[in-house]
Amino acid sequence: MHDRFDTNELRELDVSPERSDLQPPYISAASGLVCVGSHIYVVADDELCLGVFSAGDNEPGHRIRLFAGELPIGKAERKRQKPDLETIVFVPAFEGFSYGALLALGSGSGPNRGRGILLGLDPQGGVSGSPEQVDMAPMLGPLHQVFADLNIEGAAVVGDELLLFQRGNKKHMENAIIHYSLMPALVALRGSDNAVIAPSSITRVDLGTIEGVPLCFTDAAALPNGDVVFCAVAEDTHDAYRDGDCAGAAIGIVDKAGRLLSLHQLEKPHKVEGISAQTEDETLDLLLVTDADDPAIPAKLLSASIPL
C-alpha cells in the first residue's frame, strides 16, 4: 500500500427538514455519490429518498422521494425493511432520457434489496421528471449463483459497459468487478418480462488487509482514461448484513480489466462509502461521503487529492 493521505471535511450532509417529526434534518448513512454539473447526489442505504446538494455552497440540501411508504424509526426494524440503496451512477443519454439519468441500485443482499431507480436529468444536470422504478431480479439470479454473500456496493459506467462492484467481508473475502454491456443491462432492468441477464465477465480483485481485516469495495467512479477509482473499507464483519468496526479505509485505482494500479490508505479510518472524482493535471481530486453506522451522526462530505 502506498503512502497514507489526509482528507478534509467540507460539510455535514444536512438537509432542509420537511417533516421533522419523522426525519432528522440530515442524511446519516450515505452510501453512494455522483456529481453532475453543480449538483451533488447522495444515496443513503437507510432512506427512501435521494439527497441533493449544491457544489457551490454549504446550504442545506433537500431530499427527493424515490420510493413510496415510510421506514420504521427503530434501527433494527429499519435495517430489515430498508431498500439498501448502495450505488448511484450517471448514465449518458439513451432512449427516453435525452440528457442522461441517475441509476441507483440496491445491494441485492436480501429479498427486499433488489429495487432500483432511474431518474432523468435536465441539460444542467438537475433532476427532471419522476423516478422510474427498476427491478434488479434479472441480474440477481446469476449473481447469487456466483457469490455466497452478494453485496453490490458500487457502480461505474465505462464506455459501453456497466461495472458493478461486489463487496466482500471477513468470511467471504472476494471483491469483484462485474461487467455488463450497458444498454442490454438497462433494458433488462426496465423490462417487464424479468428475462435473465448474465454478466459478460467477472474479475476478482484482492485489496489486501488492514489489521487483519480485508479491504473491500464500497464505491467506484469512472476516470476519463477508462480506469476506475474506488473507495474501500476494512470493516470487521463476517457478512453483508451486520455492521462492524472500521479498521481503516483506502482509495485505489484499477484498470477495466481489474488490475490494481494504486492503493492509498486514509490517515483516519473514515467509513467512506461514496466517491466522485475529477482529474486536474496530474492530480485526482476526490469527493467522499461517510456512513458512521449510527443514525444520530450526520454523514460527512470529505475532499482529498492524490497524485495520478
Image: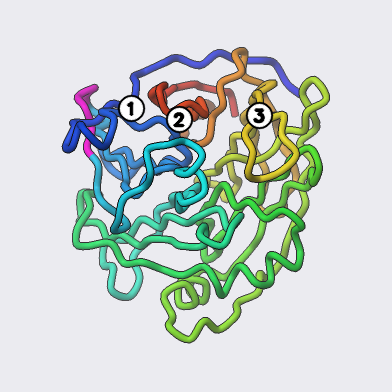
Q: Earlier in the sequence, mark 1 or mark 3?
A: 1
- Could you tell me the amino acid type at mark 1? Leu
- Residue drawn 31% across the image and 47% down it: 49
**Closer to us: 72 or 188:** 72
Point out the frontmost of discs 2 and 3.
3
- Residue drawn 65% across the image and 74% down it: 198
- Residue drawn 55% across the image and 42% down it: 219
Residue 161 can be seen in this image: yes
Residue 142 found in image quarter = bottom right
Numbered mark located on residue 289 in the image: 2
Element on which disc 2 rests: strand
Using residue 243 as the reference point, say whether residue 36 is left or right of it.
left
Residue 276 found in image quarter = top left
Q: Residues within 10 Å of mark 2 (few under 14, many from 20)?
A: many
Q: What type of secondary structure mainly makes up the magenta span?
A: loop
Looking at the picture, how far across and down is residue 169, in whole percent? 74, 40
Q: Earlier in the sequence, mark 2 or mark 3?
A: 3
**Closer to us: 63 or 276:** 63
Region rendered in magenta: 57-62
Question: Label 2 vs label 1: CA separation?
Answer: 9 Å
Residue 201 in the magenta stretch? The answer is: no
- Could you tell me the amino acid type at mark 2? Val
Residue 281 can be seen in this image: no
Looking at the picture, how far across and down is residue 91, in whole percent? 40, 59
Whether the residues at callouts 1 and 3 have beta carbons within 8 Å, the answer is: no
Looking at the picture, how far across and down is residue 92, in whole percent? 38, 61
Element on which disc 3 rests: loop
**Which residue is tagged 3?**
244
Q: Earlier in the sequence, mark 2 or mark 1?
A: 1
**Which residue is tagged 1?**
13
Whether the residues at callouts 2 and 1 have beta carbons within 8 Å, the answer is: yes
Q: Residues within 10 Å of mark 1 (few under 14, many from 20)?
A: many
